[in-house]
Each structure stands twice: as structure tokens, then as C-alpha cells.
Image: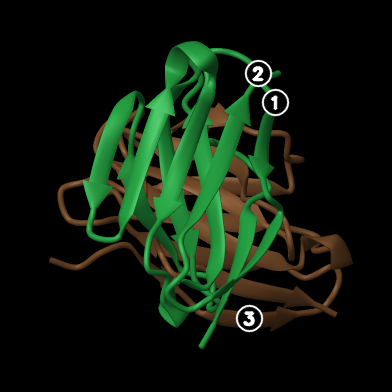
Chain colours: A brown, B green
Amino acid sequence: DAGVTQSPTHLIKTRGQQVTLRCSPKSGHDTVSWYQQALGQGPQFIFQYYEEEERQRGNFPDRFSGHQFPNYSSELNVNALLLGDSALYLCASSLAVRSIQYFGAGTRLSVL
Amino acid sequence: GIQVEQSPPDLILQEGANSTLRCNFSDSVNNLQWFHQNPWGQLINLFYIPSGTKQNGRLSATTVATERYSLLYISSSQTTDSGVYFCAFDAGNNRKLIWGLGTSLAVNP
């Protein structure tokens, strides 16, 4: 049973560029949440997708957008990258919106 | 919003020692979980513990919801226990997890 998988594992971009991160949820899960974790901090909630719709959003600008596909996989898109967007981006999946969340290994994004 | 405080922020143990990590929250919370983040960034669920006590090997956790705290016990610590321990929960009808700042644990051989 595959767990939550994220790709790519590492990514280097320059300011102003756009990036797409991908997440495949754990088998049987239908809800995907995205988090940003800066160095030395706890994860910060970005948004959550369920039934292909954004259900809840944290305090992140519109530059952060997402999508969920019919197979429950999800993408996180960040436009006009800033240096401050450098972080570990974590995807978590769960069955239904409030059950236990299981995390992928994350994508480490560096913006130069 | 609900405030969460984890203590201690940093902890250094000798292998074999026991420790208790604490998570305090300022209001009623739901779905409290404990996570371990290894040095490579992987977050692993340790416990889903909205109330009561659970044990899993050398780890156990207790949540006293009425007193707004949760404890994580690590017994006979091993070097592989090193990393950051987070408590997280969702509050009210929100669907997002709120996280503490974590306890950074280093277990020395």
C-alpha cells in the first residue's frame, strides 16, 4: 500500500518563476491538504481539497493555487515566486476532511 | 485563535533516558495528533489522541482535554528518536491542522 507520494523531492527556482508541485494521496484517501514549513517552524496550512474543490484556505496569497483531479491527486502551483517562498512543502492525505492526516516526504523548494 | 505551546523547545538526552514532552492549548481542540519529523523532513503520525491514553512500544501519549494539555512520553530513548516532535489539532469546525512550534530532540549515543 503506497503512502503519500510527492514530486519532485527538490526544486530550485529563481524569483518571478512559477512552480508546480504534485501529490498522490494514500490509497483510499480522498482529501488532500497542503502545508508550507519554513526552516525551524511548524507547518502552516495552505489549503485543503476534497471532491475537487478547495474547502478551506489558510492565510496565503492568491499566488498559491491548487487543483485536485478525479483520481484524488493534487497539484500546488505558486506564481511569481519570492525568496520567502523557499520552504519544505508538505502534502497530507486523509479520508474525509477531518480524519487523521498522513504526510508525504515533502518537496524542498529553494528560490534564488 | 487558539494558541498552542510546546515544551521544552529543545531537549538533549543520553541514549536510554526517558522524557516527557508537553503540549498546552488555550481552548477546546479536536483531533489532537502527535507527529515526529525526522532530520530529513518526513512527518510520521505517532498518535491520534483526542483524549485518554495510548501506548505504542516505547512511546505513549495522554491527552486531558478538560485541562487542555497533552503529554508524549518517550522511554528508553534511542538515537533514532532524534528529530522534532509536533502536536497538532483542528479547532472547532475548521478543517486545517494547527501546529505547535515543536520540541527538538537530540538523543546522543
> In which quadrant will I find the N terminus of chain B?
top right
Res. B78 image quadrant: bottom left
Location of residue A85 with respect to B13 vertically, above or below: above
The local secondary structure at tag 1 comes to loop
In terms of depth relative to the viewer, which is nearer, B28 or B96? B28
The reply to whether the C-beta atoms of the residues labelled 1 and 2 are less than 8 Å apart is yes
Location of residue B30 with respect to B43 vertically, above or below: above
Residue drawn at x 85%, y 80% as measured from the top left = A112
Residue at numbered disc 2: B26
The local secondary structure at tag 2 comes to loop
> Gap between marks 1 and 3, in whole Å?
33 Å
Circle 1 Cα neighbour tier, 10 Å, few/some/many (<14 / 14–19 / ≥20): few
Residue A5 at least partly seen: yes
Location of residue A30 with respect to B18 vertically, above or below: above
Give me the disc on residue B3: 1
Q: Amino acid at mark 1?
A: Gln
Residue at numbered disc 3: A11
Res. A50 image quadrant: top left
Res. B57 image quadrant: bottom left
